[in-house]
Amino acid sequence: MACTQIPDLPLDLFGRDQVQKWIEQHVPLCGSIELDLRCNLRCLHCYRDGEWPSGIMDTDELKRVLDQVAEAGTIWMLFTGGEIFLRRDFFEIYEHARSLGLIVTLFTNATMVTETIADRLSEQVPYSIEVSLYGYSRETYEKVTGIEGSRDTCYRGVERLLERGLPVSLKTIVMRTNQHEVEDMARYAQSHGVPFKYSTMINPNFDGSLTPCNVRLNPEEAVAVDFALESRLEEYREYFELRKDMTSSRVFSCGAGSRTFHIDPYGNMKMCILLRDPEYSLRSMSFQQIWNEMFPPVYTQMRSDDHQCNSCNFFSLCDKCAAWSQMEKGDVAARVEYTCEAGHRRAAKLGFYDGPLDQSTRGLEPTNEVLLPIVNSGGCCS
């Protein structure tokens, strides 16, 4: 299904034929910028290591980067963090992006949304404001965030945005700490007439620590949550029906580096926010040089001929991506046992697989054991 790090994009705004032409022309359609690594919350599942080195891009640097991004043909731009509203120059950067014609989505935890910030946003409305909720009750929310009072400031921020008719959508990461409140959050969103989505995707920390995975659901639990809502079951069914006969040997099958890019607060450009290596500095190279010369040799990589994933037609259900493999295994091509089992369990729920399912991942240590069979369309082969 869709990557949680990419905002919902209005592809029909320009027509899918036009979008396809841009893809064929290698246009960098969608980008994201982390305005800051700092955050006012300390979430259990965060893949950040809590270190925020100095030296982030200043206002003028960021504006120059956005100039290059727009000149290259980018249409959709995501502003994310950290928490974006920690930057005092946020609106100067945001309004510059809007003046360049970029369609901007904001990711925020909404805890810093004051009346003033909500008013400013209503003057130049973003395409979407995606707000992360971490629970519905105060107890659960603050158990996740580690900050007393954060639940109330978040929900007040959401209310301020909604009062002004701003395009808000709500989302959550489902983990052991808050899984019992997913339906409460969904009902809250429904009561305000706004979209709600959730994901069970939790990765190791960028520093290699497995701490975030302590609150990650196991594959069986994650898939049960995936299909808890009838609408989600149908979404998965429709999604997989179009892809059930597809296999791929590509390491990158998601568009990272060929359609999307990411820029961190220090001016380092990467193929996506979760893929931390390789990275190239916009302080010493141009956007076009990185996009046209540095990215292609990376995103065209193929897995070895004997790789287990090559013959599997469930890759659209497993959520595995090169970045997840890099974070969990230190190798962009590695098979991740957790996502592999989750993919097979989703396929079983949809009626496309009836093989073994209870070979759950035993920890996160690298292993040569084949936990699940290699799958071909219509069945398995050992």
Image (cartoon, rainbow, N blue to C red):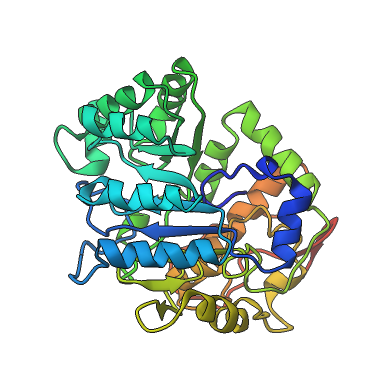
Residue placed most toward the observer, 158 or 12: 12
Could you tell whether 25 is left or right of 204 in the image?
right
In the rendered image, which quarter is residue 284 located in? Answer: bottom left
Asked if residue 275 can be seen in this view, the reply is yes
Residue placed most toward the observer, 268 or 69: 69
In the rendered image, which quarter is residue 340 located in? Answer: bottom right
**Residue 13 x %, y %:** 66, 40
Residue placed most toward the observer, 175 or 112: 112
**Residue 71 x %, y %:** 53, 65
Q: Residue at x 80, y 48 (%)?
A: 242
Asked if residue 355 can be seen in this view, the reply is no
Rendered view: 261 above or below 166: below
Q: Residue at x 27, y 42 (%)?
A: 144
Q: Residue at x 58, y 45 (%)?
A: 9
> Which residue extends farthest front?
99
> Which residue extends farthest top?
191
